[in-house]
Image (cartoon, rainbow, N blue to C red):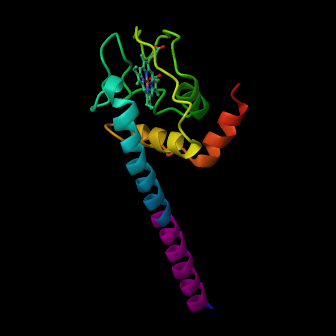
């Protein structure tokens, strides 16, 4: 009985670890694809170090929104752009962010997963399913 239990625990542990590894690989692939999009579409304003440009372009590194749980906000910014001159972590930014509505759902998931997992940011990945759901509700 005890032996069966041990075998069972080992089997479950192996399965859980394999699933976690597959998941890590998927996130790493998404980050890599997202980086390419970032370099082409975002870096000009948000800079290579994610620090933005003071008073012009908001930083993405250490941003509470980028690292936050309100994913719909992030997807909306990419799809619709952002020109609200809102206060972001205590600062205002004069530039306007253009919409990147030509990006596919997967590309949006990738670029957001990249900015949430680069520089000092350590937030969860954003999935294709999440982007699809949020985008379909945006007018
Ligand atoms: C032309 C410059 C420009 C480009 C290109 C640009 N952004 Fe922005 N971004 C801004 C500005 C300016 C703001 C702040 C807008 C405001 O205050 O209304 C901003 C805000 C943001 C925010 C919100 C930050 C926060 O802390 O709330 C995110 C997220 C973001 N951008 C991501 C991206 C991503 C990802 C791309 C590439 C797909 C991108 N931006 C391309 C200028 C740009």
Q: Position of residue 124 (x, y in %)?
A: 49, 44
Q: Position of residue 14 (x, y in %)?
A: 50, 76
Q: Residue furthest left?
A: 49
Quadrant of the displayed image that contains ligand 1: top left
Q: Main secondary structure of the magenta part?
A: helix
Q: Is residue 117 visible?
A: no
Q: What's drawn in magenta, residue-wise? A: 2-21
Residue 128 location (% of width, % of height): 59, 47
Q: Is residue 115 above or below residue 85?
A: below
Work out whether residue 88 can be spotted: yes
Say whether residue 78 is left or right of residue 133. Answer: left
Considering only vertical position in the picture, is 74 above or below 106? above
Which residue lies at the image location 41% right of the left edge and 42% below the top edge?
114
Image quadrant in which you'd find residue 35: top left
The x and y percentages for residue 115 are: 41, 37
Residue 122 vertical position relative to residue 90 in the rendered view, above or below: below
Closest to the observer, 62 or 97: 97
Left or right of 119? Residue 114 is right
């Amino acid at each position: 009985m005890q032996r069966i239990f041990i075998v069972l625990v080992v089997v479950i542990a192996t399965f859980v670890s394999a699933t976690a590894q597959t998941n890590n690989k998927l996130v790493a692939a998404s980050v890599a694809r997202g980086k390419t999009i970032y370099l082409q579409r975002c870096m000009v304003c948000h800079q290579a170090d994610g620090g933005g440009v003071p008073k012009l372009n908001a930083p993405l590194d250490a941003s509470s929104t980028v690292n936050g749980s309100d994913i719909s906000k992030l997807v909306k910014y990419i799809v619709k752009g952002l020109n609200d001159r809102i206060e972001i972590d205590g600062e205002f930014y004069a530039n306007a962010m253009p919409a990147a509505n030509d990006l596919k759902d997967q590309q949006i998931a990738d670029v957001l997963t990249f900015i949430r997992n680069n520089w000092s940011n350590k937030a969860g990945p954003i999935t294709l399913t999440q982007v699809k759901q949020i985008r379909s509700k945006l007018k």
